[in-house]
Image: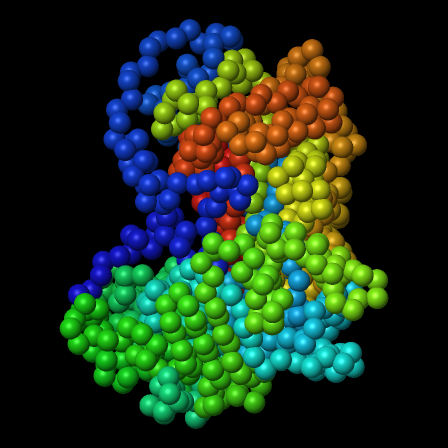
Amino acid sequence: MKKKWIALLLTATMVFTLAACGSKTQTPSAESQAPAETQAAEEESAAETTAPESEAVDEDADTPMAELNKQADIDVAAHEAESDEIYDEVFGEYEAAYDEALAETNVSLRLAKMAIAEAKFLEAGAVTPYVNDAGNYAISKIIPHTVPAVEWGFDGETRAYSGLLIADRLLTPEERTEVTSKWSELKGTGTWIDWVKQWAADNGITLADSYTLASDTNDEPTTWDYLSSSKTADGKTLSATWDGLLRYDAENIQQPALAESYEVSDDSLTYTFHLRKGVKWVTYQGTEVAEVKADDFVAGLQHVGDTPTGGLYAVISCIKNLPEYASGDITDFSEVGVKALDDYTVEYTMSEPAPWFLSVLGYSAMAPLCRSYYESQGGKFGEEFDSSAADYTYGSDAQHIVYCGPYLVSNYTYQNTIVLTANPTYYDADKVQIKTITMKYNDGTDGLFSWNNFMNGTFNGGIGLGTEALEQAKATAVPDDPDGANYFDKYAYVVSDSATSFVNFVNLQRYAYANFNDETQVVSEKTKEQADRSHAAMMNQNFRLALAFANDRGTVNAITRGEDLKYARLTNSYVPGNFISTSEEITVDINGTSTTYPVGTFYGEILQAQITADGYPMKVWDPNGADGAGSSLGFDGWYLPEEAAKYLDKAVEELAAEGVEISEENPIYLDMLYDDYSTTGSAADQAQKQILEENLGGKVIINLVPTVSSDNSSYAAYYGEYGYQMNYDYGGNTGWGPDYGDAQTYLDTVVAYGYMTYALGLW
């Protein structure tokens, strides 16, 4: 039974359950969030409710905007037309630079041009970086940078554990810094792993050949058919059972895997891969079943298109006719852009140039499927596919799949233990450092589960220090330490890397002054005159930048995270600075100056170069961050109160010329959501109000609008799908994570009509 499921793929709600996927994500400081199912039901109910007819009101200067702007009365066409004009005015330079980046097919030059485009986007001041979702303490024996750090696909999951280097003792922060600094120096040279193994030997470290760690519900497979799911719970474990055409190494460079080589056509529409010969499909017991051949990649992609929950979201927009096959508009799979040219050559054809295509090869959607074994388990293709058939057993458990990856599943007990053992027939078996991976289930009821297992030697990698474990680490002395140090003081470090960026939006075209689902909630007291003045101010670039530079994010964050971690999760760019790096030496024009960047140059370095060249003061990249590797995280490069005052002075002068006076006696009033239901959230909001007003000299007043509940807060700034539903002037915190290894996965969300532009009040 062919599933007509293309609509599911195109809905935003799907991405909440996907691994390493781009998604509109609410700021992590929110204490609660309605489940997707509840959210959908509430929105449907709200949509079906007929709003009462609004009464005629006198639109004079003192009329509250909540009385004037009713959701039932909005002229959507007019709002869209004004949105078009506003976007062009605010982001015109970004649009032009981004169009040039999109046209570039050289991956490394494209990276640089994307960074240049983001510089123009950030310089507009309408969107400022805020936090990521990391920023926690940990202790670890795992040597840094011995597995890929890519944040998309499954190349950084259990498959990558095969090359993990685990010491026989805890590493100090100083050792981690030393190693990371060297990684930063050597990445891109192909010599890193040899160096770090020698470093371990020189420091008397014996490397482990097994890895035992905790697992939880997010690690429990819901299916063993890795092609039919894109959930983290499935891919995290099952990625170890298969290998792809290419895979990332510890230097974050793609290397040959099942493909020994490949070519890309000049028009970037055709990708041809040449498979290595002799790679085996085996059972969970290691019994040989077949050889991996090109047709297995054809079978795999067809199975993805046949299943209702497959991983098409990662590749749907680029492989020719694949979305049409998935929707049922095309029933002949031979029309889809994948072909086995011979036993060892597979070719993919794009519907349009997709320079990022290689980066999706680590997703399960691009995995091979042994056609003969699949069919022996009752599997069928196309209209005949029926996973509910009595004879369909493929993927029902670990014994009903075949393996071509570095590990076999030797034991699985639900919510208890998962054991992976090295596959002796794996083509790269000699390089598998970790021979056994054991995951022990943690039900979450014992806050010291990982700490106790680590301290008794059961867990031999690393652990995060949650609240209870952090207390233990500070209270437990390191045995035989000459200084009597505790575990926290001697070994703790901050985990700050994350690819999810939460950013702060200003509302450029505000229509809602109460919640769209219930206009009695989160009601603004702003008058029409105040609203008109704040809109004029928001349309001024210098005013927007003054707001950005006046916000002390570290102080605000300390209220919810603690003083020690106040900077740990702060981010300073939309695309994380170390998200991607150049794979070849490139030369790019930075404001008329030809600048050459070597292999391994991070995106953030080029982003900073363009911002600096444009004369803006914010710091978005720290070359010494992340223990010397470089990072856009862990510092506040936007809090510049002296610059805020200068930019505000420019804005005051420019707006005066437009007839808008701004002074302490006649300030601009901006509404910010006030999460009064949360003790820490409300304290953080109050602090932010005070900081902004002081740094802007009383010329801007922040109105804290009580939300009363987390649901109301979400409906004001998150649940809405259109810009005219956004109920705030300042502080719309929303996040996005990546789908693939190209800055386009972020920047596409903020083009005209992009998925995140609703948070700007547009469209």
- In the rendering, at what x and y percent does residue 449 appear? 54, 60
- In the rendering, at what x and y percent does residue 359 appear? 51, 67
Of 694 and 494, nearer the camera is: 494
Residue for point 28% across, 61% down: 308
Q: Quadrant of the N terminus?
A: bottom left
Tell which residue pokes out farthest to the right in this image.
482
Residue 396: name its quadrant.
bottom left
Residue 170, placed above or below residue 544: below
Of 203 and 367, nearer the camera is: 203
- In the rendering, at what x and y percent does residue 649 appear? 75, 24
Residue for point 78% across, 69% down: 480
* Left or right placement of residue 217 versus residue 736 in this view: left
Residue for point 35% across, 40% down: 39
Residue 128, placed above or below residue 7: above
- In the rendering, at what x and y percent does residue 414 appear? 37, 68
* Left or right placement of residue 284 versus residue 254 in this view: left
Q: Is residue 604 visible?
A: no
Q: How is the image coloured?
A: rainbow
Q: Quadrant of the C terminus?
A: top left
